[in-house]
């Protein structure tokens, strides 16, 4: 029997595993949604419990000691075993494949930069992505779940709201207000500018858009190039706003649209595919901690 005093608590072992995987207290804190101080305290508690140093805090990065390397292997094995055991208790088996339909711009600009966190957490799941716009028959196309943009209406699918869409007018640095500037718009959203004008109580007539473009990325490039003011979903252009390539020229405003996680409806008492549930829970966690939402 292993002495009870040597058995770590779950938060401490999760904190240590995250540091071992990421090589950083900061990255581990981000991965677990905690503060860096909390991660450090949990590992210090674990080291005190074991009586050995696991992480070399004098190094520039969070480098594991020899004892830490050995313990990291044991911790990962134990966590994997617990995960498999939980699935067996629930009468489920881990499924390696998960087929997802994603929106092109949402996928490239928001989802893909975050996907490595899911892969690190669930390496047993193999993701397959397909690009889809609009509603479709999930079952007929062999798609396990989808990320959908709209008002929450999709017959035959169960929808979970991930985030509300909020738009903001943006332009190249140095642009002085919206008045007198050419307006840029998405071709698929002809009412975007009139709706924004009405929702934000702007005075004066709204000029007709000077240019319509098909893709969010192209619209961002046109605005950054000084072609006019673009009305864009704020969370999709966070890199341009952070870098200063685009500057806001007005307040953010809700559009009434949202981004939804869509999965097939299940019969009463039927459990959803385990991998779908895991991915949905992870997505909700990611959107909850996204300060743009």
Image (cartoon, rainbow, N blue to C red):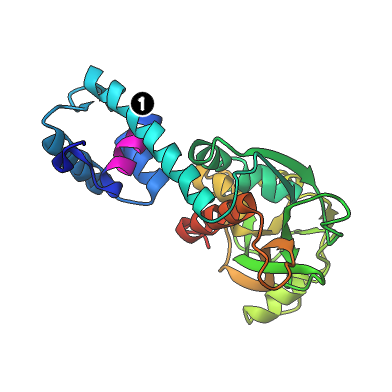
Tell me, yes or no, if residue 171 can be seen here.
no
**Residue at 34 percent of width and 43 percent of height:** 14
Please provide percent x and percent y for residue 206: 76, 74
Q: Check disc 1 and report the residue beneath it.
A: 73
Tell me, yes or no, if residue 221 can be seen here.
yes
- In this view, 280 is above or below 269: above
Instruction: Specify the segment rendered in magenta.
Output: 13-19
Considering the image in quadrants, where does the N terminus appear? Answer: top left
**Mark 1 Cα-neighbour bin, 10 Å: few <14, some 14–19, many ≥20:** few
Please provide percent x and percent y for residue 104: 75, 47
Secondary structure, mark 1, is helix
Which of the pair 87/242 is nearer the observer?
87
Residue lying at the far top of the rendered structure:
66
Please provide percent x and percent y for residue 209: 81, 63
- In this view, 194 is above or below 261: below
Q: Is residue 257 magenta?
A: no
- In this view, 105 is above or below 55: below
**Residue at 55 percent of width and 50 percent of height:** 238
Q: Is residue 18 magenta?
A: yes
Please provide percent x and percent y for residue 248: 56, 58
């Amino acid at each position: 029997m292993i002495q009870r005093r040597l058995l770590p608590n779950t938060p401490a072992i999760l904190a240590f595993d995250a540091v071992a995987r990421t090589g950083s207290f900061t990255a581990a804190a981000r991965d677990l949604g905690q503060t860096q101080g909390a991660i450090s305290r949990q590992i210090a508690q674990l080291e005190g419990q074991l009586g050995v140093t696991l992480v070399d805090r004098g190094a520039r990065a969070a480098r594991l000691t020899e004892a830490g390397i050995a313990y990291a292997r044991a911790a990962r094995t134990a966590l994997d075993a617990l995960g498999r055991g939980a699935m067996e208790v629930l009468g489920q088996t881990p499924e390696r494949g998960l087929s997802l339909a994603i929106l092109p711009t949402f996928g490239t600009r928001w989802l893909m930069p975050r996907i490595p966190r899911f892969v690190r957490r669930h390496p047993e799941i193999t993701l397959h992505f397909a690009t889809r716009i609009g509603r479709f028959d999930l079952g007929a196309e062999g798609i396990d779940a989808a990320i959908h943009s709209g008002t929450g209406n999709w017959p035959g699918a169960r929808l979970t709201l991930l985030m509300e869409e909020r738009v903001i007018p943006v332009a190249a640095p140095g642009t002085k207000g919206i008045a007198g500037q050419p307006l840029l718009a998405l071709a698929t959203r002809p009412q975007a500018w009139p709706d924004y004008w009405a929702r934000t109580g702007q005075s004066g007539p709204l000029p007709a858009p000077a240019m319509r473009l098909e893709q969010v990325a192209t619209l961002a490039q046109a605005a950054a190039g000084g072609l006019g003011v673009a009305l864009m979903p704020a969370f999709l252009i966070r890199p341009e706003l952070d870098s200063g390539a685009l500057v806001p020229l007005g307040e953010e405003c809700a559009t009434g649209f949202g981004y939804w996680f869509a999965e097939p409806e299940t019969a009463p008492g039927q459990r959803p595919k385990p991998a779908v549930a895991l991915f949905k829970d992870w997505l909700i966690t990611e959107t909850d901690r996204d300060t743009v939402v």
